[in-house]
Image (tube, rainbow, N blue to C red):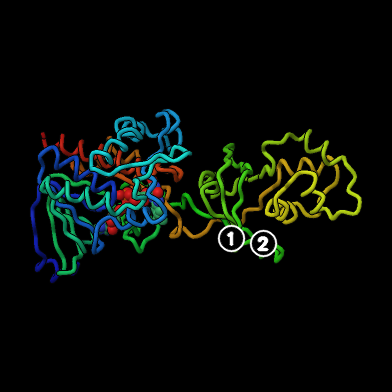
Amino acid sequence: MSKEDDANARHDKVQALIIGAGPAGLMAADALASAGAAVLVVDAMPSVGRKFLMAGKSGLNLTKDEPLASFLSHFHPQSPDLLRALTDFGPDSVQSWARDLGEPIVTGSTARVFPKAMKASPLLRRWLARLNQLGVTFEQRHKWVGWEGDTWLFDTSNGPRRITAEIVVMALGGASWSKLGSDGSWADLFRNKGIETTPFAPANMGVTIRWSPHMTPHFGTPVKGVKLMAGGVETRGEWVVTSQGLEGGGIYELSRALRSLEPATLDLLPDVTLEQISAKLRRPRGKLSISNYLRKMLKLPDISRALLMEWGRPLPVDADLSALIKVLPVPIAGTLPMDGAISTAGGVDWSALNGFELKSRPGTFVAGEMLDWEAPTGGYLITGCLATGRAAGQAAAAKLNF
Ligand SMILES: Cc1cc2nc3c(=O)[nH]c(=O)nc-3n(C[C@H](O)[C@H](O)[C@H](O)COP(=O)(O)OP(=O)(O)OC[C@H]3O[C@@H](n4cnc5c(N)ncnc54)[C@H](O)[C@@H]3O)c2cc1C
C-alpha cells in the first residue's frame, strides 16, 4: 500500500474479523456468532468456500466414522491442542453438525462419510443461510496484505481498506490449488514478523516415476489388491498408474514417507505367503513366456505383471522371484508439484501459539490448514479444519468474554 493509498484507505472497526471463508473460517464464524459476537468474514476470492466446493466435485468426504483413537492417529504432528480440538469435535460431531444443518449423510463401506448429495454446494448453501441468520456478514475480494500495528491491511476491488478488530481469526488455508484462493502468500508476511512457520510441503500428492516406454499402454490403469509400504506405514488403498507416475488414495496415505523419498516397496500378492508363491513357482515353466507363466501360476493381473517387469527387470529366478513379488522396490523419483496436491503440510508452528492464539499477537487466532498439521484424505482434512475452526472461534469468543 503506497502512502497515498494509505491516506485514502477506508478504515473500519469490527468486533470479530474472520479472514478466509473456507470450512475453518466459516466454522470459526459460526462459533463466534453463536456466542453472540458481531462477525465480519472477508475473503480474497469473489465467492466463499471455493476449495470446499471443489472437494465436493469428487464426493465431499466429510469425515470417517471410526473410533476416536484410530481417527486421531492419522494426524501429524500429534499436537495436544489439535488432538483436543478433534476430541471435542470429531467424526460423531461432524455427522451431527451436517444432519443439524438438514443435510442427509451416508457412510460408505470404508466408513467414509459423505453428504447424500455427494457435492458440497447444498451443504454450503444451508450453512451460509445459518450464518446469515446469526448475523454474520461477508465481504469478498478482500486480500489480506499485512499488518500495521493493530490494523489489518487489505487490497480490495474498491482499493485499499484498513480494518481493526477486537479479535481476529485467520483461516487462510495451505498452499495448494492456489487458483481457489489458498496461495500461501500469508506465510511470508508471518515470517517477516518473526512468527515461526514450518515450510509448506505437498501432502496427499502424486509421485513421479521415470517409466520405460513399455508402460505406456498401462497409463490410466487402477492398481488394486496390492500392499504399498514406506516409512513403516503400509496401505492396501488403490492408486492409478499415470503418465507421470502414481496417483490416488493409496499413494496419499504414505505422503509423509514418499515426499522424503524413503524407500517404498510393493507386495503384489499380500494375501498369499512367500512359501505359497514359491511352491506355485516350483512348477516347470515349459514353453510359456514368463508373463504368461506368472499369470497362470499366480493369477497376477496384467498391471501387476507389468509393474513387476518394469521394476524387477531382469527378473531373477526361483526363490528370488518369489521374494521380489512380495517386496518389489518402487523407484519413486519425486513428487508432483505442490500446487496440484490435495493439501499441504507445514504452516504456523504450534510453538508460535497458545492454544490457537498467536503468542506474539494476542487476540489473533489461527485455524484450519494454515496450521502445521497434515492428515490423509478420507475426511480427516475437513474434520481437522472444522474442529480447529470451532476451537479457535470458541477461544476468540471467550476472549471477548462471551
Ligand atoms: C480437489 C480437492 C479435493 C478435496 N477433497 C477433500 C475431501 O473429500 N475431504 C476432505 O476432508 N478434504 C478434502 N480436500 C481438502 C480440503 O478441501 C481442505 O483441507 C480444506 O478446504 C481446507 O480448509 P481451510 O478452511 O483451512 O482453507 P481453504 O478451504 O483453503 O480456505 C482458505 C480461504 O482463505 C482465503 N485466503 C487465502 N489467502 C487469503 C488472503 N491473503 N486474504 C484473504 N483471503 C485469503 C482463500 O480464498 C480461501 O477461501 C480436498 C482438496 C482438494 C483440492
Expressed as whole percent of the image width and height from the top left, the position of residue 39 reads: 13, 48
Residue in view at x 57 percent, y 54 percent: 240
User: What residue is at 33 percent from the left and 59 percent from the top?
Assistant: 185
Residue drawn 31% across the image and 41% down it: 352
Q: Residues within 10 Å of mark 2 (few under 14, many from 20)?
A: some
Q: Which residue is mark 1?
A: 220
Q: Is mark 1 within 8 Å of ligand 1?
A: no
Between 80 and 378, the one lying in front of the other is 378
The local secondary structure at tag 1 comes to: loop
User: If you read the primary sequence from the N terminus, does the residue marked by circle 2 or circle 1 appear first?
Assistant: 2
Which residue is farthest bottom?
A: 4
Count the marks. Answer: 2
Label 1 Cα neighbours within 10 Å, binned few <14 / some 14-19 / many ≥20: some
Question: Quadrant of the image for the C terminus?
Answer: top left
The disc labelled 1 sits on which kind of residue?
Gly
Asked if residue 72 lies left or right of residue 147, the reply is right
The quadrant of the image that shows the N terminus is bottom left
Disc 2 element: loop
Residue at image coords 30%, 56%: 186
**Relative side of 284 to 220, left or right:** right
Q: Which residue is mark 2?
A: 211
* Residue type beneath disc 2: Trp
Whether 47 is drawn above or below 150: the answer is: below
Residue nearer the viewer, 74 or 292: 292
Report if residue 173 is visible in the image: no
Q: Residue 126 appears at what percent x and percent y? A: 22, 49
